[in-house]
């Protein structure tokens, strides 16, 4: 199975017996509020809005959403909005967590706290972005643009496994992943190319994830069939066959996603994988559409986790 566009992703949205409880941490964000209430209109979620005291009511009034059903949790100055949202999840008052108008570090640090956060045992968390790019024939994933700054080879394995799990939730069996680098040949001067070669070799001998893995490979060869033809680069998935990209480190991935957003105006959505619950995380300047897509993605993940746990 392959998803050609976000309409096909939306077609996978579950129909839960009761709406899923979505906890929005930092709910004073107009576009995210519009995306969340759009998801409510479909019967997918019930919103729990967490924010500093006094901020959300005025935003709801400005947006004409005051009469829409919701739960409001207001936090006094000096207390953590992210911490209150996480507490709601830990107390089983929520099914999905979503980052709103909070800096990524201020949101992720308490999420990953070993004592009070949302870690799923010893699993490593990482972020996966899904994007629809101009001229690329299907949705493509990119990891990790938000959580792991400079992954070593063991953490890259975790990123790969988490990315594969997201694809499994979407119905893919063996997604094809590219280990992106500046060049497509290993060189000791570039550690990520050496690690890519090692990962591909290990995957071919003792697989650590249920996927096809290729690399190192440069971005142009991943995306463009013309580049592959001109460079005479032979790979069965170059120029449109890859399902996902594993970036060498966070700065590269984050810059690439922001380039897609700003220059290509690409629809994107994203989720943090490896936690006890799905976590929607998009850019703080994401549109209502992108926020809505992230909610739908996390709802799909929620149903996948339930089946995986046998619930």
Image: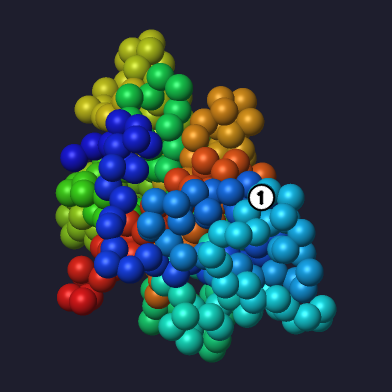
Count of marks overlaid on the render: 1
For the residue labelled by badge 1, is the local secondary structure a helix, a strand or a loop?
loop
Q: 196 or 123, which lies in front?
A: 123
Q: Is residue 202 depicted above or below 119 in this figure? A: above
Q: Can residue 130 be seen at all in this image of the molecule? A: yes
Q: Position of residue 153 (x, y in %)?
A: 42, 59
Q: Residue furthest front?
A: 67
Q: Residue at x 44, y 52 (%)?
A: 41
Q: How would you rate the neighbour count of disc 1 (Cα within 10 Å): few for under 14, some for 14-19, many for 20 or more?
A: few
Side (left or right) of 2 relative to 103: left
Side (left or right) of 46 relative to 262: left
Q: 195 or 165, which lies in front?
A: 165
Q: Quadrant of the C terminus?
A: bottom left
Q: Where is residue 301 in the image (x, y as percent from the top left)?
A: 33, 60
Q: Which residue is drawn at 21% across and 47% down?
A: 172
Q: Is residue 173 depicted above or below 15 in this figure? A: above
Quadrant in the rendering for residue 107: bottom right
Q: Is residue 91 depicted above or below 279 in this figure? A: below
Q: Quadrant of the N terminus?
A: top left
Q: Where is residue 88 in the image (x, y as percent from the top left)?
A: 53, 80
Q: Residue at x 37, y 36 (%)?
A: 6
Side (left or right) of 252 relative to 162: right
Q: Mark 1 points at which residue?
A: 64
């Amino acid at each position: 199975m392959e998803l050609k566009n976000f309409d096909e992703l939306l077609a996978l949205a579950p129909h839960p017996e009761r709406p899923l409880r979505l906890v929005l941490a930092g709910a004073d964000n107009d576009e995210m509020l519009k995306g969340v209430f759009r998801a409510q209109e479909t019967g997918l979620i019930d919103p729990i809005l967490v924010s500093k005291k006094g901020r959300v009511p005025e935003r709801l009034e400005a947006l004409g959403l005051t009469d829409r059903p919701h739960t409001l949790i207001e936090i006094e100055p000096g207390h953590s909005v992210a911490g209150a949202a996480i507490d709601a999840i830990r107390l089983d008052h929520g099914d999905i967590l979503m980052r709103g108008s909070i800096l990524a570090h201020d949101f992720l640090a308490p999420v990953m706290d070993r004592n009070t956060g949302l870690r799923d045992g010893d699993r490593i968390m990482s972020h996966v972005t899904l994007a629809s790019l101009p001229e690329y024939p299907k949705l493509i994933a990119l990891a990790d643009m938000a959580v792991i700054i400079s992954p070593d080879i063991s953490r890259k394995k975790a990123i790969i496994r988490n990315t594969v799990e997201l694809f499994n939730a979407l119905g893919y069996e063996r997604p094809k992943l590219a280990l992106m680098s500046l060049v497509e040949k290993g060189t000791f001067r570039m550690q990520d190319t050496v690690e890519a070669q090692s990962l591909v070799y290990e995957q071919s001998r003792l697989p650590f994830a249920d996927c096809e893995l290729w690399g190192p490979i440069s971005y142009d060869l991943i995306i463009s069939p013309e580049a592959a033809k001109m460079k005479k680069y032979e790979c069965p998935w170059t120029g449109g066959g890859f399902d996902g990209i594993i970036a060498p480190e966070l700065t590269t991935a984050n810059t690439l996603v922001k380039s897609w957003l700003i220059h290509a105006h690409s629809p994107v959505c994203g989720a943090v994988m490896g936690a006890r619950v799905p976590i929607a995380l998009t850019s703080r300047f994401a549109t209502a559409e992108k926020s809505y897509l992230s909610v739908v993605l996390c709802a799909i993940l929620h149903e996948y986790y339930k089946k995986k746990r046998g619930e």
